[in-house]
Every structure is written in C-alpha cells, then in structure tokens.
C-alpha cells in the first residue's frame, strides 16, 4: 500500500548521513514547506515537493496533515518500563530532604521495585507494561528502548526480558531490549561482606549466557556509580557482554564523576547515559569516540537537582548528544518525550533543532539504528509523527502538552487523535486548518 503524507505546514526531515550528528551538524533539522512524504509498505520511498509527489503518487492513499508539522517518529533510547508498582511515596521523602542514596539505604529506591517485581508473574508484568508503552508512544515515539533491571536474579531478569519481547511482538512500535542485570547489587548479595564480587560473577557466569542464548537483548547496560558498580566491575561485565554478542550501554557519571564516560569511550559503547557529573576528561573522551552521550534532563528536574549534564560543552566539543525520557518508577515517571525536549532547551541550553536531532537521528544512533530510523528520507523505515503545530518550535514551547496527533511505525498507524480543544486557545497565524 502506498501512502502520501500531504498538506503539512512543515515537514521536518532531519535528513542527512545515517549516523550520529555532532557539533554544528545538530543545528540543522531540515525544515521543508510544501513538501510531501511517500510511503510504500514499511519504507519511505520519496520526500519532495508536494506538487510533484501528488502527480507521481496520484493513486496513493492520502494522509491529510493540514495544520500540522510532520517529523520522524521520536526515538526514546532510555526507558525502564518493566516494573510493578509505582513509587510515589519517595517524591515526598525527597521533598523533605532525603537523598537518592539515603532512600536506597532505607530500603526504597531500586530495591523496593526489585522486591515487588519478583512477586509478579510474566503475565502481570505484561499487563502493566502494555499501557505504559502505548502511552510513551502516544507522545510521539515510534522506537523505544526498554531495559530489564528490577529482577536482579536469573529468573526475574529473564522474565522481564521476555515481557519486552512479547510487547515487541504485539505492538507496532519498534522496541529495543536491554539487559540491565547490573542495575544494582541485590540485597541477598549485599548482606554479607565480600559478596559484591559474587554478584558480578553471577551476572557473567549465570545470567548473561542465558540472556544471550535466548537472544533476549540487543544491549547490555551497567549502572556505573560509586556504591553500585565500580569502573572495574563495569568493565568486566561489559567486556563479557560484548563477548556474548551484545552491544553496550552504560549509566555513567549521573551523581558523581566516576570515570564512566571514559570507560564507555574505551569500550566503544554505543551510548553513555546520564552524564550530569561528567568530568572534563570524560567530555574529551566522548568527543573523540563514536559513543553517543544520552542526556536525561527529566530525571534531574524530577529529583529537584539544579545540576544538569553539560550539553552545550558536549556538543561544542563535538560529541553526539541524544535525549531520552529515562521513564522509570523512581526518578523519571514521565511518558512525555516532548517535555524532555522542553528541558533540553530550558535546562540544557540546546536549540530546538538540536533537541529534535537528539530525539531522532541521535536517539537512533544510541541504539545502533541510525541507518534505519530517525529521519524522513527515501529508504528509511516509515516511522513518522504528526504534531498539532504549525511550526516545529511549538513542540517544546507548549510544554507538558500532548501535541502528538498520530504516529506510524514501519508504515503502520500506531495511534491517532482528534485536534484537541486547546486549538481554540492557540493563535493560528494562518488559519488554514482543514479536515
Ligand atoms: Zn536509566
């Protein structure tokens, strides 16, 4: 089936080389007017002047994008969507001044999600995760990375990864599974002195082989932070994971500069994520590597931190920067990827074009998919998002609003909604709304 997306006020293609964009390359999102996008089956076949495409694809089914902006589907390259109960009680503890590590020491944080997830069946977790992933997608994402990491035992990590696999089979959005068995050291390994090393061995000798054998994950990830996994332990786990055929990610330098970014660069990790506390040496290491710096400003806002990742310095040094939601029950319970773009502008001092490249092309690069998705260009996967906006700058501007009108993943419609009532409040400078 051929579809022709026509009448969009702007078509923002993000087109260019099928790799991560760096430095000044991130400033050009390629905004076209009077353009159309032709889709055949799962692929984009043509992007060009509407006048010409309307003639060439006269038989195509038309998707009327009047009054809207068309962009590539967003790529959310960092989520922890497989969990049981939410952890809203911690929000007030934090407001009262209890820190992240203190909440963890009091039995909250990741440990409480682990105890909870272990009691749940695969079906239960699937039923909880399905609407969450749909909701993430409803804000414009057509590719979503999902991590395990609240199981921390062979059985419970495999259960979490199987839930991701099942979601990927049932949903039109593209899901990328990541094994995060090294999210935390579980209590049963923390209780006795000297057991930390045993958990690292358990991850490498018992968990990883099963994850790899069942092909349940594309990536391995480690929470490299003082008090969790050291740089040496992270190197050991990630090296073994690479040996087992997995690509690498790293939670690095979130709270304290710890050498995580340098390790990610050294190992050729696909991405290093968080980086709010990255050192100068870490910035230099990433700038000289192919590792994407994935920044998660929503987490820092939700945690009430004033410190943010130095996006400007990273971009200016020539690092490829991506943005993602970090959707998780403890530190970033948001479905709203466009809100992260708002934070990209207001907290990280990025331009709108930079935030959009960070959420499309560079998000795809953070998943090793930059030659398949993240841009509207011939040969790319037909992953598109339609926004209730006349100008791309409205997406981060109407902050917290859900402006996404519809998404298509691999040519298949994921969701669609009617223009909301708030259109009445929006000043439309050229009232050409149709449909
Ligand atoms: Zn994370």
Image (spheres, rainbow, N blue to C red):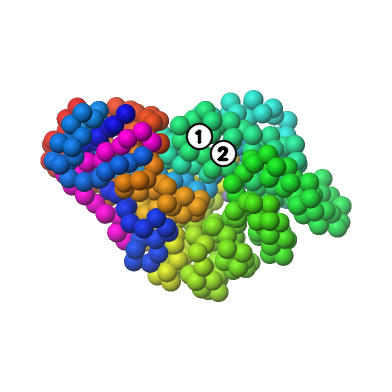
Residue behind mark 2: 81
- The reply to whether discs 1 and 2 touch (Cβ–Cβ < 8 Å) is yes
**Where the C terminus falls, by quadrant?**
top left
Of residues 105 and 264, the one nearer the viewer is 264
Residue 379 drawn above or below residue 240: above
Question: What residue is shown at x 51% (from left), y 50% (from top)?
Answer: 367
Quadrant of the rendered image containing residue 7: top left
Q: Position of residue 222 (x, y in %)?
A: 65, 54
Taking the image as drawn, is residue 291 in sight? yes
SS category of the residue bearing label 2: loop
Q: Position of residue 238 (x, y in %)?
A: 67, 57
Q: Earlier in the sequence, mark 1 or mark 2?
A: 2
Left or right? Give the position of 418 relative to 364.
Answer: left
| Residue 400 counted in the magenta span | no
Magenta span covers which residues?
27-42
Question: What residue is shown at x 65% (from left), y 47% (from top)?
Answer: 180
**Where the N terminus falls, by quadrant?**
top left
Q: Position of residue 394 (x, y in %)?
A: 27, 46
**Mark 1 Cα-neighbour bin, 10 Å: few <14, some 14–19, many ≥20:** many
Residue behind mark 1: 133
Question: What residue is shown at x 45% (from left), y 66% (from top)?
Answer: 319
Question: What residue is shown at x 58% (from left), y 42% (from top)?
Answer: 177
Quadrant of the rendered image containing residue 338: top left
| Residue 36 counted in the magenta span | yes
Alpha carbons under labels 1 and 2: distance apart: 7 Å
Residue 162 drawn above or below residue 189: above
């Amino acid at each position: 089936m051929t579809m022709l997306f026509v009448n969009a006020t702007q078509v923002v293609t993000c087109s260019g080389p099928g790799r991560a964009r760096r430095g000044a390359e991130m400033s050009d999102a390629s905004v076209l007017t009077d353009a159309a996008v032709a889709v055949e089956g799962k692929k984009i076949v043509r992007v060009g002047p509407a006048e010409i495409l309307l003639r060439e694809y006269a038989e195509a089914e038309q998707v009327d994008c009047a009054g809207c902006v068309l962009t590539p589907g967003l790529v959310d390259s960092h989520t922890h969507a497989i969990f049981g109960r939410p952890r809203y009680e911690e929000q007030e503890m934090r407001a009262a001044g209890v820190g992240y590590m203190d909440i963890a020491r009091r039995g909250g944080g990741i440990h409480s999600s682990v105890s909870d997830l272990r009691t749940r069946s695969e079906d239960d977790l699937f039923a909880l995760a399905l609407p969450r992933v749909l909701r993430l997608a409803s804000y414009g994402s057509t590719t979503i990375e999902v991590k395990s990491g609240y199981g921390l035992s062979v059985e419970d990590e495999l259960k979490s990864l199987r839930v991701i696999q099942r979601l990927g089979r049932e949903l039109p959005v593209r899901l990328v599974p990541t094994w995060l068995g090294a999210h935390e050291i579980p209590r049963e390994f923390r209780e006795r002195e000297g057991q930390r090393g045993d958990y690292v061995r358990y991850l490498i000798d018992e968990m990883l082989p099963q994850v790899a054998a069942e092909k349940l994950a594309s990536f391995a990830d480690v929470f490299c932070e003082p008090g969790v996994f050291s740089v040496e332990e992270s190197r050991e786990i990630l090296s073994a994971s690479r040996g087992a055929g997995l690509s690498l990610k790293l939670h690095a330098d979130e709270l304290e500069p710890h050498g995580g970014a340098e390790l990610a660069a050294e190992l050729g990790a696909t991405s290093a994520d968080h980086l709010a506390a990255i050192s100068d040496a870490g910035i230099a290491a990433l700038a000289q590597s192919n590792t994407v710096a994935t920044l998660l400003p929503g987490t820092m806002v939700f945690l009430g931190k004033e410190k943010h990742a130095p996006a400007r310095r990273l971009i200016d040094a020539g690092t490829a920067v991506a943005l993602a939601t970090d959707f998780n029950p403890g530190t970033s319970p948001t479905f709203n990827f466009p809100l992260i773009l708002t934070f990209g502008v207001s907290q990280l001092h990025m331009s709108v074009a930079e935030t959009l490249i960070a959420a499309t092309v560079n998000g795809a690069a953070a998943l090793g998919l930059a030659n398949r998705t993240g841009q509207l260009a011939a040969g790319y996967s037909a992953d598109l998002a339609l926004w209730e906006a006349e100008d791309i700058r409205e997406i981060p501007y109407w902050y917290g609003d859900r402006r996404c009108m519809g998404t298509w993943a691999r040519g298949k419609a994921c969701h669609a909604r009617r223009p909301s009532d708030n259109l009445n409040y929006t000043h439309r400078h050229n009232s050409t709304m149709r449909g």
